[in-house]
Amino acid sequence: MATIPADYSAAPPARDNYLTHGRGILSWLCTLDHKRIGVMYLVSILAAFLLGGIFAILIRTELLTPEKTIMGADTYNQFFTLHGAIMTFLVIIPGIPAALGNFVLPIMLGAKDLAFPRINLLSYYLWVAGALFSVLAIVMGSVDTGWTFYIPYATDTTMGGVIPVLMGVFVLGFSSIFTGLNFIVTIHKMRPPGMGWFELPLFLWALYATAVIQILATPVIGITGLLLIAERVGQFGIFHPGLGGDPVLYQHFFWFYSHPAVYIMILPAMGVISEIISIFSRKHIFGYHFIAFSSIAIAMFGFIVWGHHMFVSGQSTLISVIFSLLTYSVSIPSAVKVFNWLATMYGGSISLRAPMLYALAFIFIFGIGGLTGLFLGALATDVHLHDTYFVVAHFHYVMMGSTLIAMIAGIHHWWPKMVGRMYNEAAAFIAWVFVFVGMNLTFFPQFIMGAHGMPRRYYNYPPEFENLHQMSTWGSYLMAVGFVIIAAYLLHSLFAGRTAPANPWGGATLEWRCASPPPHDNYPVTPTAGDPYDFSDLKYNPQTGDYESDRGPAAS
């Protein structure tokens, strides 16, 4: 089996790293260093997550009682719309690719940066501009249409925030497209010697498949948003039935993007989990080729299943049956990944550090999210469950419970590499308990509510659902406490955490072969790659807490 030569972790730590290379705010705002751009993305996305999370807590607090609790119905509509739009477009879609992907991808390739550093910085500022447009919506009268902006809500509402949010989504689309283009070119053109397509780490396969979706699907939502703005401003008959338009056409356009967008969210998450499962099981990934090709298969299937969101829209029965069959088919490559992760863990030497805890939580939560999706993919049950809390629970299990959990896993996994400090493992375990228990307590009762007919988005609800709603709300509080603990110990580690070795987890991919935090140019020389999941030449040094290679330091 091939090994990765040149253990860069054994080289003396560089005094000048990407955090200290150029001081002052301007050196960050004008940087072309992919690592700094990734960190700026991460901080900005977490700020958006805080805002969206506050809206979520306020929504759940309102639903503690069947009648008014802390806000009126109009405010409630605004809050759940803003929560959905912020979490979807500002947090979950860009979270792993833009933040973690930006930081890790070039180092995993042994490259000094992405192919187009200036476009990378432009992508970040486009994200910031899109975020500012979305926040501007709050100042300009907010928005109460729901995050899907369905017709006629988006055209008839008197609130002034619809156009700013749609402009924000349009600008965010360019950020997503440019990031995807940059990733594809970098993976194609900047692989080091010895890294063919089947020596790529699986995280890079996931980012590659994600980038394809970003480039092909994102223009659709951008153009749809512009058409909606034009109809709202000029009263053109595009989507509004009162003007001669077709509201179902809007749904086709919206979901043609938004279902592939589900895989923009979940594919990078799966890539993160593939890396963590192998490293913390101390075992070569099982079925590498199957996992790699399943990422491409998921990206392809993602474009042909949007119609399962529209079973009750009046589309023909034949088309609905076809979309139902395709929906069931897309579960196959997802199941391939899960079975291969479980096979990787079988017989492995599992280390229950924080990244692995979140990876195991991902498998459990994604399993529930995927299995409940089967009920929504079947025509007979979807008609009953459509627009109920069952859909809310399924969506959050897949998007929030899986994608966000994987993002947290990735942050914990690469945090020592990013900041050069270790966090407190005991605090991380406590936070994991709060997040895992809170997440399931928040959303599992919603499956029961939905199966019994509780509609989603309702401000008031029948008293018989009060106990389940209260369980859901208390779960959200537990989850919030977990996130606060995570923020506390990660921030604490910046100032008081012990110095991180280059390879604290014993990874064999190239990012663990440079110092922590990485030098400005990543590597003194371009490394030669091999099997990214071969751990045979790594030995643990208890004195340094590092995994070291027998092959010695790289030539400088």
Image: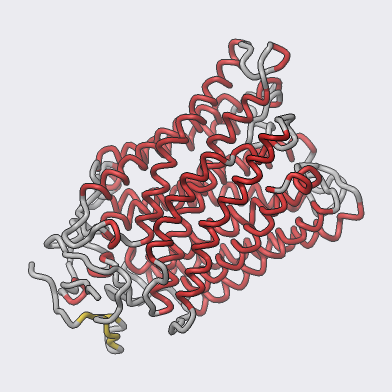
Q: Is residue 389 left or right of residue 228?
A: right
Query: Percent position (x, y) of residue 72?
Result: 79, 39
* Residue at (61, 16) in percent of width and height: 238
Q: Quadrant location of residue 126?
A: top left
* Residue nearest the observer in this picture, 325 or 66: 325
| Res 514 seen here | no
Q: Is residue 347 above or below residue 321?
A: below
Q: Nearer the viewer, residue 189 or 40?
A: 189
**Dividing the image into 4 quarters, which one contains the N terminus?**
bottom left
> What is the residue that sits farthest to the right in this orientation?
463
Q: In the image shown, does 323 or 308 lie closer to the viewer?
A: 323
The number of discs equals 0
Rendered position, 160 above or below 351: above
Q: Which residue is farthest bottom?
A: 542
Quarter residue 320 falls in: top right
Displayed quadrant of residue 319:
top right
Left or right: 193 with respect to 166?
Answer: left
Q: Residue at x 21, y 71 (%)?
A: 4
On the image, the x and y values in percent for residue 257 come to 53, 36
Quick one: 293 or 116, which is closer to the camera? 293
Look at the picture and state if 319 lies above or below 192.
above
Q: Residue at x 27, y 43 (%)?
A: 185
- Image location of residue 538, percent across then percent down: 26, 81
**Residue farthest front in this picture:** 318
Camera sees residue 197: yes
Q: Residue at x 65, y 62 (%)?
A: 368
* Whole-percent x, y for residue 507 in the image: 32, 73
Figure quadrant of the C terminus: bottom left
Relative to 437, is 260 on the left or the right? left
